[in-house]
Amino acid sequence: MSKSKNKVFLLTNDDGPFSEGVRKLGETLRQFGRVVTVVPHQEMSGSSHALTLNRPLQLKEIEPDFFIVNGTPADCTYLGLFHILKEKRPDLVLSGINNGYNMGEDVIYSGTVAGAMEGAFHGISGVALSARTFRNLPAILEHVSVLLAQILRMEEKIMLNVNYPEGEIRGTVMTRLSSRVYPGKVEPCQQSRNQQALWIGGVPPV
């Protein structure tokens, strides 16, 4: 990717402002242009493509061009596009890097995927990035730079969901979604003396 610094990137995630993935990705993108980061104020994993329509959203700039929102990843992208960057549409919307894969049925639940998809809904290419772990983060970021150079040269608008393995990165393979169904699980927990609460969710499939 040319280091002309003339690109504008909108960056979000579903892990919140303290995620190593979003911080390191932002540092990488700043080599090539302006990065506006808009993320949920807390972890919003599993929020899917929900938009908050029943209350106003609070937007706070905690660092230059780094905002937090009391909403979902899709809310964050929407505010980035139509409020913060309303005078200058970004060249690309990115979401991540998520700590954990988003594959198969995950993409329906994923706030990470939704953050990128919201950009694609409005005519801007979106890229959702996820990794099995962050142990190989430098190599992941190097590959992201190569991938973005290819995307920015494309005339057509696209939406990509990219998952990085824990081991060596040997290139890019295009594929289709497989099935990744979680076994159902409901786990009771005691919330108070007279009220029982329930955790939902299963162990991720291998």
Image (cartoon, rainbow, N blue to C red):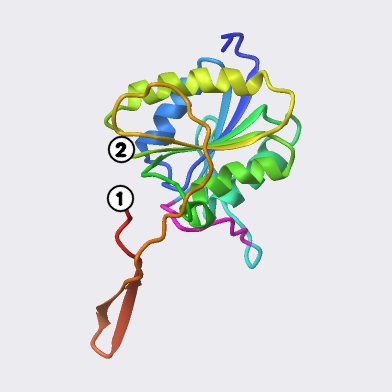
Q: Is residue 50 magenta?
A: yes
Residue at 29 percent of width and 60 percent of height = 203
Between residue 40 and residue 152, name the one nearer to us. 152
Q: Point out the stretch of residues depicted in magenta.
A: 42-52
Question: Percent x, y for residue 32?
Answer: 56, 16
Between residue 188 and residue 10, name the one nearer to us. 188
Residue 79 visible? The answer is no
Q: Residues within 10 Å of mark 1 (few under 14, many from 20)?
A: few
Closer to the N terminus: mark 1 or mark 2?
2
Q: Nearer the viewer, mark 1 or mark 2?
A: 1
Corner quadrant of residue 99? top left
Question: Percent x, y for residue 174?
Answer: 53, 32
Residue at 74 percent of width and 23 percent of height = 155
Q: Main secondary structure of the magenta part?
A: loop
Q: Amino acid at mark 2?
A: Thr
Task: Give SS at disc 2.
Answer: loop
In the rendered view, does 7 fall on the left or right side of 182? right
Q: Amino acid at mark 1?
A: Val
User: Which disc is residue 177 wearing?
Assistant: none
Between residue 74 and residue 55, name the one nearer to us. 74
Residue at 58 percent of width and 17 percent of height = 149
The residue labelled by disc 2 is 133
The residue labelled by disc 1 is 206
Q: Residues within 10 Å of mark 2 (few under 14, many from 20)?
A: some
**Rounded to the nearest whole Å, what is the CA distance between mark 1 and mark 2?**
14 Å
Residue 136 visible? The answer is yes
Task: Give SS at disc 1.
Answer: loop
Corner quadrant of residue 89? top right
Question: Against 61, is 193 above or below?
Answer: below
Question: Percent x, y for residue 109?
Answer: 50, 57
Question: Percent x, y for residue 194?
Answer: 27, 90
Which quadrant: the N terminus?
top right
